[in-house]
Protein backbone atom coordinates (compact mmCIF):
# COMPACT_ATOMS: atom_id res chain seq x y z
CA UNK A 1 0.00 0.00 0.00
CA UNK A 2 1.45 3.30 -1.08
CA UNK A 3 1.33 6.08 1.56
CA UNK A 4 0.82 9.60 0.23
CA UNK A 5 2.57 12.52 1.95
CA UNK A 6 3.22 16.22 1.40
CA UNK A 7 6.30 17.13 -0.50
CA UNK A 8 8.65 19.75 0.91
CA UNK A 9 7.51 22.18 -1.78
CA UNK A 10 3.83 21.70 -0.89
CA UNK A 11 4.63 22.19 2.81
CA UNK A 12 6.49 25.43 2.12
CA UNK A 13 3.62 26.72 -0.02
CA UNK A 14 1.12 25.90 2.75
CA UNK A 15 3.25 27.71 5.34
CA UNK A 16 3.54 30.72 3.05
CA UNK A 17 -0.24 30.87 2.59
CA UNK A 18 -0.76 30.63 6.37
CA UNK A 19 1.77 33.43 6.89
CA UNK A 20 -0.02 35.67 4.39
CA UNK A 21 -3.39 35.00 6.05
CA UNK A 22 -1.96 35.84 9.48
CA UNK A 23 -0.47 39.09 8.15
CA UNK A 24 -3.86 40.06 6.72
CA UNK A 25 -5.96 39.03 9.71
CA UNK A 26 -3.85 40.36 12.59
CA UNK A 27 -4.62 44.06 11.93
CA UNK A 28 -8.31 43.20 11.54
CA UNK A 29 -8.34 41.28 14.82
CA UNK A 30 -6.50 44.11 16.56
CA UNK A 31 -9.02 46.68 15.33
CA UNK A 32 -12.06 44.76 16.52
CA UNK A 33 -10.67 44.35 20.03
CA UNK A 34 -12.33 46.65 22.59
CA UNK A 35 -10.51 49.92 23.27
CA UNK A 36 -9.65 49.49 26.96
CA UNK A 37 -8.83 53.16 27.53
CA UNK A 38 -12.16 54.22 26.02
CA UNK A 39 -14.04 51.75 28.21
CA UNK A 40 -12.26 53.08 31.31
CA UNK A 41 -13.04 56.66 30.25
CA UNK A 42 -16.72 55.73 30.03
CA UNK A 43 -16.48 54.15 33.48
CA UNK A 44 -14.87 57.28 34.95
CA UNK A 45 -17.49 59.51 33.36
CA UNK A 46 -20.29 57.36 34.76
CA UNK A 47 -18.74 57.71 38.23
CA UNK A 48 -18.53 61.49 37.83
CA UNK A 49 -22.15 61.68 36.67
CA UNK A 50 -23.37 59.50 39.52
CA UNK A 51 -21.48 61.27 42.30
CA UNK A 52 -22.20 64.75 40.95
CA UNK A 53 -25.92 63.95 40.70
CA UNK A 54 -26.00 62.58 44.24
CA UNK A 55 -24.25 65.63 45.66
CA UNK A 56 -26.15 68.32 43.77
CA UNK A 57 -29.43 66.77 44.96
CA UNK A 58 -28.31 66.34 48.57
CA UNK A 59 -30.28 69.03 50.39
CA UNK A 60 -28.42 68.33 53.65
CA UNK A 61 -25.11 69.38 52.08
CA UNK A 62 -26.19 71.73 49.28
CA UNK A 63 -29.56 73.23 50.22
CA UNK A 64 -31.44 75.21 47.60
CA UNK A 65 -30.67 78.88 48.25
CA UNK A 66 -31.83 80.34 44.97
CA UNK A 67 -34.56 82.27 46.78
CA UNK A 68 -32.23 83.63 49.49
CA UNK A 69 -31.12 87.21 49.82
CA UNK A 70 -28.73 88.25 47.08
CA UNK A 71 -25.71 88.14 49.37
CA UNK A 72 -26.58 84.58 50.51
CA UNK A 73 -27.59 83.00 47.20
CA UNK A 74 -25.58 79.87 46.40
CA UNK A 75 -25.41 77.90 43.18
CA UNK A 76 -24.89 74.27 44.08
CA UNK A 77 -21.24 73.45 44.68
CA UNK A 78 -20.12 77.03 45.30
CA UNK A 79 -21.56 76.64 48.82
CA UNK A 80 -18.69 75.92 51.17
CA UNK A 81 -20.50 76.08 54.50
CA UNK A 82 -20.97 73.05 56.71
CA UNK A 83 -24.40 71.86 57.83
CA UNK A 84 -25.38 69.71 60.76
CA UNK A 85 -26.88 66.96 58.57
CA UNK A 86 -24.13 66.91 55.94
CA UNK A 87 -22.10 63.70 56.36
CA UNK A 88 -18.32 64.18 56.02
CA UNK A 89 -18.66 67.96 56.03
CA UNK A 90 -20.08 69.40 59.19
CA UNK A 91 -22.35 66.57 60.25
CA UNK A 92 -22.03 63.50 62.48
CA UNK A 93 -18.23 63.64 62.57
CA UNK A 94 -18.21 67.04 64.26
CA UNK A 95 -20.00 68.35 67.33
CA UNK A 96 -20.92 71.54 65.53
CA UNK A 97 -21.08 72.36 61.85
CA UNK A 98 -18.13 74.03 60.15
CA UNK A 99 -18.65 77.75 59.74
CA UNK A 100 -15.70 78.37 57.41
CA UNK A 101 -16.63 78.78 53.77
CA UNK A 102 -14.33 76.56 51.69
CA UNK A 103 -16.18 75.37 48.60
CA UNK A 104 -13.18 73.53 47.11
CA UNK A 105 -12.44 71.42 50.19
CA UNK A 106 -16.12 70.75 50.77
CA UNK A 107 -16.78 69.49 47.25
CA UNK A 108 -13.60 67.37 47.12
CA UNK A 109 -14.26 65.90 50.56
CA UNK A 110 -17.77 64.82 49.61
CA UNK A 111 -16.79 63.73 46.08
CA UNK A 112 -13.78 61.63 47.10
CA UNK A 113 -15.73 60.03 49.95
CA UNK A 114 -18.17 58.52 47.42
CA UNK A 115 -15.45 56.92 45.29
CA UNK A 116 -13.81 53.54 45.87
CA UNK A 117 -10.28 54.64 46.73
CA UNK A 118 -7.26 52.39 46.35
CA UNK A 119 -5.91 53.43 49.74
CA UNK A 120 -8.44 53.93 52.50
CA UNK A 121 -8.72 57.58 53.42
CA UNK A 122 -9.54 58.00 57.09
CA UNK A 123 -9.50 61.79 57.04
CA UNK A 124 -12.81 63.56 57.59
CA UNK A 125 -11.95 66.20 55.03
CA UNK A 126 -9.58 66.83 52.15
CA UNK A 127 -6.67 68.97 53.26
CA UNK A 128 -5.65 71.04 50.27
CA UNK A 129 -2.86 72.70 52.22
CA UNK A 130 -2.97 75.74 49.98
CA UNK A 131 -2.11 73.62 46.93
CA UNK A 132 -3.88 74.13 43.62
CA UNK A 133 -4.15 70.39 42.90
CA UNK A 134 -5.21 67.28 44.77
CA UNK A 135 -4.43 63.75 43.54
CA UNK A 136 -5.86 60.36 44.50
CA UNK A 137 -6.20 56.88 42.99
CA UNK A 138 -9.22 54.60 42.78
CA UNK A 139 -9.15 50.81 43.07
CA UNK A 140 -9.45 50.42 39.30
CA UNK A 141 -5.96 52.08 39.14
CA UNK A 142 -7.24 55.32 37.60
CA UNK A 143 -5.40 58.42 38.82
CA UNK A 144 -7.54 61.49 39.47
CA UNK A 145 -6.08 64.98 39.77
CA UNK A 146 -8.31 67.82 40.87
CA UNK A 147 -7.07 71.04 39.31
CA UNK A 148 -8.16 74.57 38.40
CA UNK A 149 -10.42 74.70 41.44
CA UNK A 150 -12.57 77.82 41.18
CA UNK A 151 -15.71 76.99 43.13
CA UNK A 152 -15.65 80.21 45.13
CA UNK A 153 -18.98 82.02 45.31
CA UNK A 154 -17.31 85.19 44.02
CA UNK A 155 -16.41 83.51 40.73
CA UNK A 156 -18.75 84.33 37.87
CA UNK A 157 -18.77 80.74 36.59
CA UNK A 158 -17.62 78.45 39.44
CA UNK A 159 -16.12 75.13 38.35
CA UNK A 160 -13.55 72.48 39.15
CA UNK A 161 -11.60 70.22 36.81
CA UNK A 162 -10.51 66.61 37.13
CA UNK A 163 -7.70 65.22 35.00
CA UNK A 164 -8.27 61.45 34.86
CA UNK A 165 -5.51 59.07 33.78
CA UNK A 166 -7.57 55.99 32.94
CA UNK A 167 -4.67 53.51 32.95
CA UNK A 168 -2.88 54.92 35.96
CA UNK A 169 0.93 55.11 35.91
CA UNK A 170 1.13 53.23 32.59
CA UNK A 171 2.30 55.10 29.51
CA UNK A 172 1.87 56.86 27.14
CA UNK A 173 0.10 59.56 29.24
CA UNK A 174 -1.46 61.75 26.59
CA UNK A 175 -4.87 63.19 25.84
CA UNK A 176 -4.36 64.38 22.26
CA UNK A 177 -1.83 64.02 19.42
CA UNK A 178 -0.10 67.23 20.55
CA UNK A 179 -0.07 66.39 24.28
CA UNK A 180 2.66 63.77 24.61
CA UNK A 181 5.53 62.93 26.91
CA UNK A 182 7.77 61.84 24.06
CA UNK A 183 5.67 58.77 23.32
CA UNK A 184 3.86 58.07 20.07
CA UNK A 185 0.23 59.00 20.60
CA UNK A 186 -0.99 59.29 17.05
CA UNK A 187 -3.74 56.66 17.40
CA UNK A 188 -6.97 57.07 19.32
CA UNK A 189 -6.24 53.94 21.36
CA UNK A 190 -3.07 55.62 22.70
CA UNK A 191 -5.03 58.36 24.47
CA UNK A 192 -5.35 57.64 28.18
CA UNK A 193 -6.05 61.00 29.84
CA UNK A 194 -9.01 63.37 29.71
CA UNK A 195 -10.35 66.39 31.55
CA UNK A 196 -13.81 66.58 33.10
CA UNK A 197 -15.01 70.05 34.08
CA UNK A 198 -17.76 70.18 36.72
CA UNK A 199 -19.67 73.42 37.16
CA UNK A 200 -21.29 74.58 40.36
CA UNK A 201 -24.76 73.88 38.97
CA UNK A 202 -23.85 70.22 38.26
CA UNK A 203 -23.19 70.53 34.54
CA UNK A 204 -20.31 68.35 33.28
CA UNK A 205 -18.10 69.02 30.25
CA UNK A 206 -15.54 66.64 28.74
CA UNK A 207 -12.79 68.69 27.12
CA UNK A 208 -10.94 66.17 24.94
CA UNK A 209 -12.47 64.97 21.67
CA UNK A 210 -11.47 61.31 22.07
CA UNK A 211 -13.11 61.15 25.49
CA UNK A 212 -16.22 62.93 24.22
CA UNK A 213 -16.63 60.11 21.71
CA UNK A 214 -15.80 57.46 24.31
CA UNK A 215 -18.53 58.55 26.72
CA UNK A 216 -21.11 59.05 23.96
CA UNK A 217 -23.87 56.49 23.68
CA UNK A 218 -23.06 55.94 20.00
CA UNK A 219 -19.35 55.30 20.57
CA UNK A 220 -17.85 52.27 18.80
CA UNK A 221 -16.06 50.43 21.61
CA UNK A 222 -13.85 48.61 19.11
CA UNK A 223 -12.05 51.88 18.41
CA UNK A 224 -11.43 50.72 14.85
CA UNK A 225 -10.57 54.20 13.58
CA UNK A 226 -7.37 56.02 14.38
Image: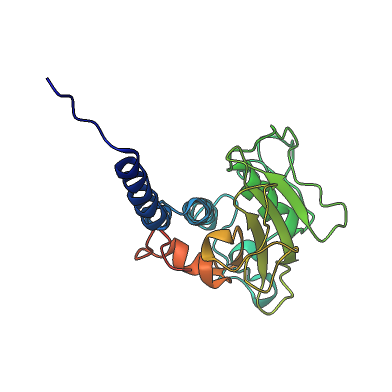
Most distant residue in the top direction: 1
In the rendered image, residue 94, in percent from the top left (x then y), is placed at 73, 37
The residue drawn where x is 70% and y is 47% is 169
The residue drawn where x is 43% and y is 61% is 223
Q: Is 43 positioned to the left or the right of 104 in the image? A: left
The residue drawn where x is 70% and y is 61% is 183
User: Is residue 47 shown above or below 123?
Assistant: below
Most distant residue in the left direction: 1
In the rendered image, residue 147, in percent from the top left (x then y), is placed at 74, 62
Residue 62 picture quarter: bottom right
Coloring applied to the structure: rainbow
User: Is residue 197 shown above or below 14?
Assistant: below
The quarter of the picture where the N terminus appears is top left
In the rendered image, residue 74, in percent from the top left (x then y), is placed at 63, 68
Q: Is 28 positioned to the left or the right of 176 in the image? A: left
* Viewer-nearest residue: 155 or 31: 31
Q: Is 134 positioned to the left or the right of 13 in the image? A: right
Residue 66 picture quarter: bottom right
* Viewer-nearest residue: 197 or 187: 187
* Viewer-nearest residue: 82 or 10: 10
The residue drawn where x is 72% and y is 45% is 97
Q: Is 142 positioned to the left or the right of 148 in the image? A: left
User: Is residue 51 shown above or below 211?
Assistant: above
User: Is residue 218 shown above or below 192?
Assistant: below
In the rendered image, residue 92, in percent from the top left (x then y), is placed at 66, 35
Residue 81 visible from this viewpoint: no
* Viewer-nearest residue: 61 or 173: 173
Residue 190 picture quarter: bottom right
Amino acid sequence: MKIKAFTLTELLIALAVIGILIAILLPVIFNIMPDQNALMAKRAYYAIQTVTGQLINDESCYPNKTQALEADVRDGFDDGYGYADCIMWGGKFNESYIDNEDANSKFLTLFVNKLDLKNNNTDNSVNLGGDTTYEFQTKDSMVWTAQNMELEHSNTNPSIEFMIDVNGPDKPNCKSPTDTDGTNCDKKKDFDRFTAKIYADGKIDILEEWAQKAVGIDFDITGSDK
